[in-house]
Image: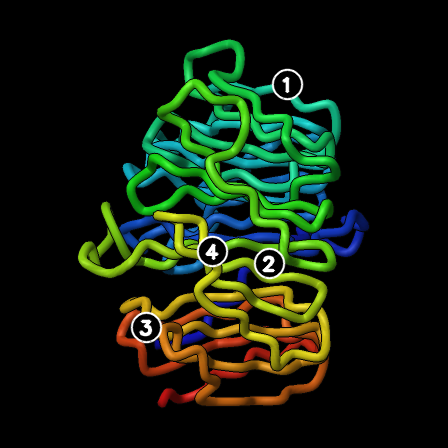
Amino acid sequence: GPVRLLPHGSGPKDRKNKDVTTLEWSSDGKLLATGSYDGVARVWSLGGSLVHTLRGHKGPIFSLKWNKKGNYLLSGSYDKTTIVWDVSTHNGFIEQQFNDHQAPALDVDWKDDTTFASCSTDKTVHICRVGMPRPLKTYTGHADEVNAVKWDPSGNLLASCSDDCTAKVWDVNSDRKDPLFDFKSHQQEIYTVKWAPTGPGSKNPNKLPMLATASFDGSVRLWNVQDGSCIQVFSRHRDSVYSVAFSPSGNYLASGSLAGQLYIWNVMEGRHIKSFKGKGDIFEVAWNKEETRVAACFSSNVVCIIDFP
């Protein structure tokens, strides 16, 4: 079909930085949400028309997530707040704004349709619920800013990663304040964590539940979240690893570095099976659902699509 351009600036007088910092499709694939540096979240239809313009943040949006039902959009911002937007009617509005972080909110992730996690430069992780004025839980185990939070497929475990060089897994159903697992093997900051689409609650329930951590030390580590052991260390990268993505089956892992190097790994065997070098830094990698292609986006304004295997 035709390529549609989504203009975020309204005219030549509109000088404010409109760089798109984050985007996500709704679960039914009918709406695309974009968050930008001007603090505005926008929702677009498949046809490219602007459905919602959501103004409420006073600083850049860093993270934007749909809930599964598709009635709420969640945003985390430099202004220290997270906002749950109701986008179920033709007028999108703020359902609730959460002001509990003391510094920029760097990432957000839904547990279910009304419960979410957020993390911040203030070193904390919060679990919040729509309708509740205060966080249900606050985790304070990290010693530096927390870069990302991700729920596992079952929604029972929350992973977080930080500039303190650790990744932690929190059991949200228990009352313990310390993490279930504390992964300390990385030598530099951990920018991203990803759960494998395996184990309870996933499409591959009989496969081992696993977590991948990617670090500025150039390594990607794979963890067994049943016993906390390290399954694999993928250490081919010479530069900071900024992005990782599991294939839909959970059998393969793609990783991209700030030097434009993409690797694809066989997860259980721990060996690298494909390489690609592009121009510029890789900021994000993603698989198609058929597991036949990997996309990588580069700082050189290029997106490369690589056939697999």
Query: Could you tell which of marks 3 and 1 lies nearer the N-terminus?
Result: 1
Which residue is at a point 45% across and 38% down the rendered structure image? 158
* Mark 1 residue element: loop
Q: Position of residue 273 (x, y in %)?
A: 44, 88
Q: Disc 3 marks which amino acid?
A: Asn
Q: Which corner quadrant holds the N terminus?
A: bottom left
Q: What residue type is labelled 2?
A: Pro
Residue annotated with mark 4: 194
Q: Residue at x 71, y 66 (%)?
A: 217
Q: In this view, does 69 lie above or below 84?
A: below
Q: Earlier in the sequence, mark 3 or mark 2?
A: 2
Instruction: From this view, report whether residue 237 is shown above or below residue 138.
Output: below
Determine contact: label 3, label 1, CB under 8 Å: no
**Element under disc 2:** loop
Badges 2 and 4: C-beta atoms under 8 Å apart? no
Q: Nearer the viewer, mark 3 or mark 2?
A: 3
Q: Which mark is residue 100?
A: 1
Q: Residues within 10 Å of mark 2 (few under 14, many from 20)?
A: few
Asked whether disc 1 touches disc 4, contact meaning CB atoms under 8 Å apart, the reply is no
